[in-house]
Image: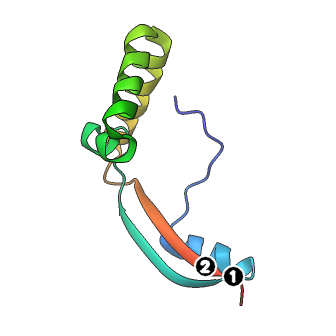
Amino acid sequence: AIRVNANPLTQIEWVQACESAGLQVQFHQTGAMGLLNPKQMLHDEGWLGTMKITWNMSIDPQLRSRILQMRQVFQEYKDDLGYIVLCAQRP
C-alpha cells in the first residue's frame, strides 16, 4: 500500500484552506496525475533519472513490488486522482 499521511481535498477545499490560512489565491489549475507513468517520468526525471529509477527497481525486489503496487493503485483510480497547482500570497 501507499504509505503517506495525506488527506485528499477537492479544489474548493484547497482554496478554502489557503484562505483560512490568511492567503489570497491568485491562480489555481488542476489536471490528470501522471505519477509513475513512463512518459511523464521521462519528462519529470529526464533519461538519466528514469534509468536510475529503473535500475534501482531491477535490483531491489521489495522496491519494485512497492512501486508496481503504487502504479496499480494510480491506474485503478486515475479518473479520481489528479494534481492541483495553487499560487497564493499574503495580502
Q: Earlier in the sequence, mark 1 or mark 2?
A: 1
Q: What is the CA distance from the residue labelled 1 to the residue labelled 2?
A: 6 Å
User: What is the crowding at mark 2: few (fewer than 14 residues within 10 Å), some, or many (at least 20)?
Assistant: some
Q: Amino acid at mark 2?
A: Ala
Q: Is residue 84 left or right of residue 76?
A: right
Residue found farthest to the front: 48
At horizontal 40% and vertical 53% (from top left) the residue drawn is 81
x and y percentages locating residue 44 in the rendered image? 37, 46
x and y percentages locating residue 40 in the rendered image? 30, 45
Report how many numbered discs are placed on residues in the image.
Answer: 2
Question: Residue 23's mark?
Answer: 1
Q: Amino acid at mark 1?
A: Leu
Name the secondary structure under disc 1. Answer: loop
Q: Is residue 18 left or right of residue 69?
A: right
At horizontal 39% and vertical 41% (from top left) the residue drawn is 45
Quarter location, residue 37: top left
x and y percentages locating residue 7 in the rendered image? 61, 53
User: What is the crowding at mark 1: few (fewer than 14 residues within 10 Å), some, or many (at least 20)?
Assistant: some
At horizontal 47% and vertical 22% (from top left) the residue drawn is 66
Residue found farthest to the bottom: 91
At horizontal 41% and vertical 26% (from top left) the residue drawn is 53
Quarter location, residue 29: bottom left
Residue on which the image places disc 2: 88
Q: Is residue 6 above or below residue 50?
A: below
x and y percentages locating residue 49 in the rendered image? 40, 33
- Who is closer to the viewer here, 9 or 43? 43
Q: Is residue 57 above or below residue 21?
A: above
Mark 1 touches mark 2? (CB < 8 Å): yes
- Who is closer to the viewer here, 8 or 54? 54
Residue found farthest to the left: 39
